[in-house]
Amino acid sequence: MSAAQWVEPVDVHAVTGTAEALFRSTFGGDADGVWAAPGRVNLIGEHVDYAGGLVLPFALPYVTVVAVRVRDDAILHAVSTHTGESWQGPLADVAPGHPSGWSAYVAGVVWALRRSGHLTATTGFDVAVHSTVPVGSGLSSSAALECAFALAVADLAGLPTDESGRRPLIDASIRAENEIAGASTGGMDQSVAMLARPGHALLLDCRDGASRHVPLDFRSAGARLVVIDTNAPHRLVDGQYGNRRATIEKACADLGVATLRDVADRDAAVAALSSPAAQRARHVLGEIRRVYEVADLLDRGRIADIGDALNRSHASLRDDYEVSSVELDSAVDAAREAGAWGARMTGGGFGGSAIALVPTDRVDAVVENVARRADTASLPTPQFLHAEPSGSAHRL
Ligand code: ADP
Ligand code: MG
């Protein structure tokens, strides 16, 4: 029998202190400043970004903090409490695949900002990183790292950091992840880390990058959104992700549309495809509709009514898209059994995290039931996070 384990959000000033202390012990002297960016969770809209769909993420109260100082020798020296490892090298040598490992997410941001003409070739940086975002749990510690550092670079270089000034920083963070770290992702994570607003989700249109803020106040609805990090190892993620993407691209070619978003008659499109493309397309088309449905309910303040769409999203990801896992299904089922209004896997799947919308007086029962179910089935012990819609990257 395992007691539920919560990961409490640490006060940002305590996180800052840890990053500053690491900076001083590694580099000597003080940083020029400290910046933070949040992790995120996607409320709904899974595996639709590469189909030109819409997603509805919000920022979590867990952040990655970077303490940064400018250098004038075009060298990057980066250190993190997460790995304990530092990396140092000339920024001129940064290229796809180099550096490898975690420093690619930092070096890649400078590489991209140099390429887009936002940064001069002589600028270098000392960077100390500390994070309270769980790393590798599908809560986007990678974008939190990129975006905290991108904002630091922009501030130190005198670039604008208002909403429109953040667009090139989002682009640079995406390029760092795709091209230098070699991780294939859409732009959801970086957009929400840079544009999120407290008490709101970000409705992001992946077709053209347009976004708007949608009110999201769980407390006023007498509820909480609980993130369940299954702690399950990711399996086969890259191959399966590429396989799903390729299936959707082939389906688009067969249907003669640029993206599945452009399909006019959903039922006819699914009927025209053979298995498994038909099920995969049915998920994507249904999920895009569910994002509209949830955004519309939230616009009308009807948070308590979104549970059903969350449940349908999970069933579709499990049965049609086949990206769930025994750990995610266990968490979702146990959460609903103990009184959640809705629950679903979130993120790419095959491990990672689930979310549950829970009336406040059932939160303890839900987390206990999820933990107990995992224990009984000899699954990894899950941990739980508080998903209070939080703000975007900022300077401290
Ligand atoms: P997620 O973004 O969901 O946490 P990813 O696999 O996309 O998972 O990114 C995790 C990777 O990002 C880590 O393996 C590491 O390379 C890098 N990373 C994230 N946060 C940190 C950190 N605080 N310190 C060092 N590296 C980090
Ligand atoms: Mg990531």
Image (cartoon, grey):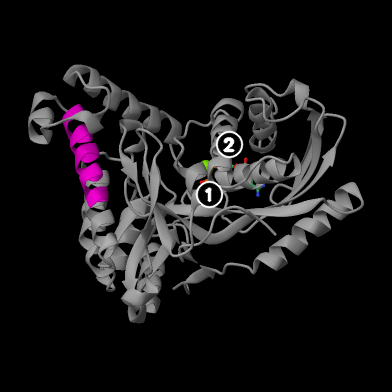
* Residue 238 seen in render: yes
* Pointer 2 residue: 173
User: Could you give the CA–CA distance between mark 2 and mark 1, rounded to whole angstroms?
Assistant: 10 Å
Give the camera-side residue of 165 and 190. Answer: 165
- Prevailing secondary structure of the magenta residues: helix
Q: Residues within 10 Å of mark 1 (few under 14, many from 20)?
A: many
* Pointer 1 residue: 193
Q: Position of residue 141 (x, y in %)?
A: 57, 48
Q: Position of residue 317 (x, y in %)?
A: 27, 45
Tell me which residue sits at (16%, 27%) in the image: 275
Tell me which residue sits at (26%, 46%) in the image: 318
Give the camera-side residue of 314 and 108. Answer: 108
Horizontally, residue 278 falls left or right of residue 29, namely: left
Does the magenta portion include 117? no
- Mark 1 lies on a secondary structure that is helix
Q: Position of residue 80 (x, y in %)?
A: 73, 48
- Residue at disc 2, CB closer than 8 Å to ligand 2: no
Residue 65: quadrant of the picture: bottom right
| Span of residues in magenta | 276-292
Residue 77: quadrant of the picture: top right
Give the camera-side residue of 362 and 4. Answer: 362
- Residue at disc 1, CB closer than 8 Å to ligand 2: no
Tell me which residue sits at (22%, 23%) in the image: 251
- Vertical order, 93 against 307 (above or below): above
Amino acid type, mark 2: Ser
- Vertical order, 247 against 209 (above or below): above
Mark 1 or mark 2, which is nearer the start of the sequence? 2
Does the magenta portion include 290? yes
Instruction: Tell me the quarter of the image containing the N terminus.
Output: bottom left
Horizontally, residue 306 falls left or right of residue 380, namely: left
